[in-house]
Image (cartoon, rainbow, N blue to C red):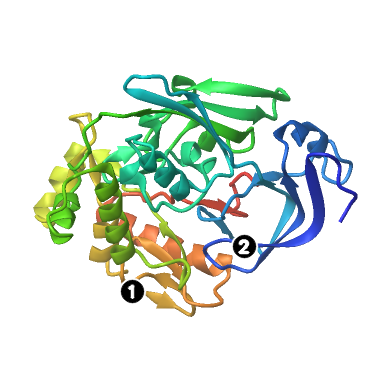
C-alpha cells in the first residue's frame, strides 16, 4: 500500500466483494474520502490511463473475468445535508454517493419525507441509484432527483447535472449509457411531505391487508415492500445474486398481440405509449423452462425465475454463460430480446471502466 495522500488511499492486488460472491480481484483499488482528490488519484503514475470502475456494495455488477485490469474506486463519503426544509410541501436533500440506499429510505421516512417508500430494501449505495434509475413497485427514483453531482473525467471538472441532463429512462440514464465518463459523487432529492402513497402496483394493497389491515402510511408501505421482497427474492446473504438480472422488455404492441395468439395468459403492462407494452421477463423465463435451472453452481433461482444465482463457487464466466443461454432461449421462443440489469465487467464489447 502506498503512502496515503490526503483524500484517498491506493492499494494493489485487492480482492473484490460483490453480492454474486464471485472470486475476483483488481490490480488497483482506491478508497476515496475526499472527492476533490479524484483528479490527483487518476493522475497517479501507477494508475494513469487504466480503466476505472466505481464500485459500491457490488450489488449490481458481475465480474466475468477473475481479475479486473484497472482501478476500482470506492467512495467513502456518506453524509446527508438538508438543502431546504423550510415550511412547505417539499424537502430538498443532498446525499453523498456512499450512503446505503435503504438507510436513506429510513432516514427520510423518520423525518416525514415521502416518495422513497416503494424503493425500500433495494441493495446498494445512493450513487448507484441514478445510474440504474432504480425502480420498484410503480416508482422510479428519477421522479425525485433534482440533480446529480459528478466528476466528469472527460472535462476534468465536477459538474451538476439537472434531471433533464440525466436522461432518465426505464432502468437507464446518461450515466449508464456513458459508463466510463462520470463518477457520481452525490444526489439531490426533492421529497414531498404530503403526497399520497402509491399503491397501484399489484400486491401492495393485499400485503397491507395481510399485515392486519394497516393504513397506507409511507412507513407501512415500506414495511410491506420489504416483506414482499424478502419473500420473493433470494437473500444475497444466503445465496449469491444481484436481484433481478434481466430488465422487463418493452416491445411493440403488435408483438404482444401476436404472442397472445399462442400464449393467452402472457402478462403485459402499459408504458405511457399506446404503441408499446412492457412484458414480464420473469414470465418469459419461467415459460421457457428456466426456473430453477442449474449447471454446476450457476443457475436461475427456483424462488424467482428472474434471478441469476451462484449456489457456491460459480465463476463470473459460468454465470454469464447461463444468462446468455437463457436470453437466447427466450429470444428464440418469443422473439423478445432480454437485456441484463447489472453491469457485466469483462464481457467482450463491454466497456471496462
Quadrant of the rendered image containing residue 290: bottom left
Alpha carbons under labels 2 and 1: distance apart: 25 Å
Q: Residue furthest front?
A: 87
What is the secondary structure assignment of the residue under circle 2?
loop
What is the x, y in percent for residue 19?
52, 62
Q: Residue furthest bottom?
A: 296
Q: Which mark is residue 17?
A: 2
Q: Is residue 292 left or right of residue 95?
A: left
Residue indicated by mark 1: 292
What is the x, y in percent for residue 249?
31, 45
Task: Give the quarter of the figure containing the C terminus.
Answer: top right
Residue at image point 61% right, 29% down: 150
Residue at image point 42% right, 38% down: 133
Foreground pick, 162 / 5: 5
Residue 139 higher or lower than 149, as above or below: below
Label 2, residues with CA under 10 Å away: few <14, some 14-19, many ≥20: some
Foreground pick, 265 / 53: 53
What is the x, y in percent for residue 199?
19, 43
Q: Which mark is residue 338?
A: none
Mark sitting earlier along the chain (2/1): 2
Amino acid at each position: 500500500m502506498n503512502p496515503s495522500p490526503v483524500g484517498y488511499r491506493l492499494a494493489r492486488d485487492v480482492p473484490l466483494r460483490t453480492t454474486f460472491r464471485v472470486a475476483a480481484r483488481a490490480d488497483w483499488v482506491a478508497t476515496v474520502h475526499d472527492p476533490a482528490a479524484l483528479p490527483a488519484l487518476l493522475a497517479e503514475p501507477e494508475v494513469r490511463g487504466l480503466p476505472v470502475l466505481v464500485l459500491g456494495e457490488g450489488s449490481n455488477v458481475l465480474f466475468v473475468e477473475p481479475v479486473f485490469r484497472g482501478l476500482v474506486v470506492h467512495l467513502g463519503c456518506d453524509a446527508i445535508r438538508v438543502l431546504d426544509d423550510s415550511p412547505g410541501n417539499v424537502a430538498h436533500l443532498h446525499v453523498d454517493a456512499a450512503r446505503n440506499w435503504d438507510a436513506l429510505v429510513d432516514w427520510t421516512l423518520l423525518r416525514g419525507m415521502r416518495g422513497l417508500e416503494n424503493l425500500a430494501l433495494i441493495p446498494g449505495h445512493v450513487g448507484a441509484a441514478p445510474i440504474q434509475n432504480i425502480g420498484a413497485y410503480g416508482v422510479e427514483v428519477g421522479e425525485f432527483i433534482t440533480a446529480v453531482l459528478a466528476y466528469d473525467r472527460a472535462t476534468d471538472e465536477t459538474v451538476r447535472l439537472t434531471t433533464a441532463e440525466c436522461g432518465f429512462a426505464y432502468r437507464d440514464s446518461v450515466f449508464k449509457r456513458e459508463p466510463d465518463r462520470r463518477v457520481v459523487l452525490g444526489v439531490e432529492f426533492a421529497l414531498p411531505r404530503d403526497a399520497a402513497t402509491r399503491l397501484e402496483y399489484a400486491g401492495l394493497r393485499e400485503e397491507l391487508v395481510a399485515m392486519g389491515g394497516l393504513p397506507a402510511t409511507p412507513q407501512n408501505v415500506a414495511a410491506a415492500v420489504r416483506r414482499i421482497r424478502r419473500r420473493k427474492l433470494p437473500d444475497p446473504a444466503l445465496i449469491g445474486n444481484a436481484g433481478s438480472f434481466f430488465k422487463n422488455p418493452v416491445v411493440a404492441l403488435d408483438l404482444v398481440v401476436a404472442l397472445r395468439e399462442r400464449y393467452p395468459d402472457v402478462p403485459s403492462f402499459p408504458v405511457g405509449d399506446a404503441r408499446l407494452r412492457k412484458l414480464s421477463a420473469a414470465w418469459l423465463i419461467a415459460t421457457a423452462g428456466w426456473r430453477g435451472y442449474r449447471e454446476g453452481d450457476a443457475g436461475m433461482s427456483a424462488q424467482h425465475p428472474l434471478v441469476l444465482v451462484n449456489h457456491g463457487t460459480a465463476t463470473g464466466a459460468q454465470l454469464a454463460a447461463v444468462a446468455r443461454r437463457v436470453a437466447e432461449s427466450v429470444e428464440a421462443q418469443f422473439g423478445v430480446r432480454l437485456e441484463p440489469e447489472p453491469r457485466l465487467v469483462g464481457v467482450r464489447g463491454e466497456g471496462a471502466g
